[in-house]
Amino acid sequence: MRQSVHAVRIMMVALTLVFVVGVDTAPAQQPSGSNPTALSVREDELLRKFGEVQGQITIPDEKLAMLEHPQGRDYRRFHERVLPWIGGIAIVGMIVALAAFYFVRGPIRYKRDEKSGRKILRFKVIERFTHWMTATSFIVLAITGLNYFFGKRLLLPLLGPDAFATWSHWAKYAHNFMAWPFMLGVLLMAVLWLRDNLPDRYDIEWLKAGGGFFGEGEPPAGRFNAGQKLIFWAVLLGGGLLSASGIVMLFPFWFTDIDGMQAAQYVHATMAVIMIAIIIAHIYIGTLGMQGAWDAMGSGEVDLAWASQHHRLWVDEQLAKSRRGPPVGGGSAPAPAE
Amino acid sequence: MARMKFLCDANRCIDCNACVTACKNEHDVPWGIQRRRVVTLNDGNPGERSVSMACMHCTDAPCMAVCPVDCFYRTEDGVVLHSKDLCIGCGYCFYACPFGAPQYPRVGNFGSRGKMDKCTFCSGGPEPDSTEAEYVKYGRNRLAEGKLPLCAEMCSTKSLLAGDGEVIEKIYQERVAMRGYGSGMWGWKIAYGDTVAS
């Protein structure tokens, strides 16, 4: 009995305390209870803190949980301002430079303006096939790729909206599917030519002498001179980067989120215009720029005089081999060079 | 001339998704396409808010700028629309859009997204107003019928406002003044310029 009275007394005291405390603090509070603003998320704060507004959704498309992503404006700046400028400067600049070089220096000719008449096999069928597969797909990729940002500036006024949209539609598919022979080509090139493109002691000399582009003499070089090695590594690394960023874009949002998709385009497009400029120079030297160079990738056989002029060490090596083994070949019946 | 805008008062949105449902039904939007969606911020925590978001019909629209075939155009009401006949489904508008508005019928491997679809502010597309051709591609043209977008019309708490920018901004600012708080005019600074008050 005494215990229960004690308990009641404690409860009374407690209740009184609660009441008194409650009455005491009530006037300090807002009339309508708590102010929701104090707790509510605010747009400006979120943007300041995270640079974007990410929430949660109840639909399957997870990327839509991003409520606000102002970085889209950076993407736009790159796509509409930066890219057309660097693309234009790189490509037009390269063409102008090559044209100037052609008219001032002219093509690199045979030394004595005469051919030896003897042929030496420079590129096997598989090498030529790889080269041309990569080359044709690259040209298709370059034209259809440039269409993505130069098309509406240059072609749209000529073709009109409907014809241009149809062309761009097919160009997009060409771009997406020609990517695969290109990537295969880059891989094959790595297998076929990596060994012969490793730097050697002649490269520095060759580069120092300007590769025979400016002076008369051309320094000795192996199967590939330093200039060709640079092209090879540019294709391998540049093409590799284009392939990697391209695959990210071929499978949107599989590998990355919206920021990654934007970054993939920055890498892809910047690398692409640089590669296009480099390949324009490569096409120049293989056609207009150097007499006899075309044959190497055309028929695969080059004149022995051309080979000795540009790749003396390689020719010496091949001739030495042929003295031991089957002949290098003369005219109509060439033997494999390797 | 009115300058059409959306405004979502996040302090009123109850995440009921009626706007989303109304939009899907009114325009017969294909499965998987979200012309409008409700995003919940700070979900489950004190201060949680939900915002209904669709195309904001930006003043200087990034989608319009990056489109490689120039398929976007702006109506007299300031609504950003596009032509599905010209769209090649490259996906650039989604990368450029700050609000995730452009949608595509398919996932899009090998560039197979299909034609882009997005909120039209219930005002159709380039086809003649209120025709079957317009309805099939872009949905109902309510503006041509003198009506406002259904999502906002249906909103039970009048959280989502659609209409002339000046009018809906005034309504919102009056609410903020009356109740003494607001969480901001979501997306307005990004869509209509940094001079917009928050």
Image (tube, rainbow, N blue to C red):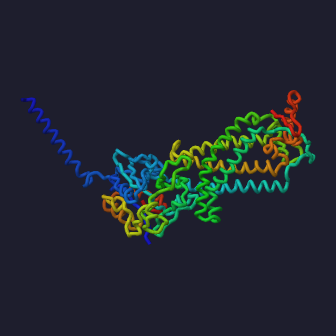
- Note whether residue B9 is visible: no
In the current view of this chain or complex, which residue is farthest to the bottom? B1
Q: Percent from the top left, x then y, of residue B132?
A: 43, 64
Which quadrant is home to the C terminus of chain B?
A: bottom left
Locate residue A238, reporting x and y percent.
67, 44
For residue A290, say whether it is visible.
yes
Instruction: Kindly give the residue lying farthest to the top in the view shown.
Output: A324
Residue found farthest to the left? A1
Q: Is residue B187 above or below residue A298?
A: below
The N terminus of chain B appears in which quarter of the rendering? Answer: bottom left
A275 with respect to A121 (left or right): left
| Rendering coords of residue A286 (x, y %) | 79, 48
Percent of width and height locating residue A127: 75, 39
Q: Nearer the viewer, residue B151 or A83?
A: B151
Residue found 50% across the figure and 54% down from its top: A70
- Is residue B196 rendered to the left or right of residue A158? left
Q: Residue at x 34, y 46 (%)?
A: B46
Number of numbered discs? 0
Quarter of image, res A204:
top right
Q: Is A115 placed left or right of B155 in the picture?
A: right
Q: Is residue A22 above or below residue B119?
A: above
Question: Is A233 rendered above or below residue B53?
Answer: above
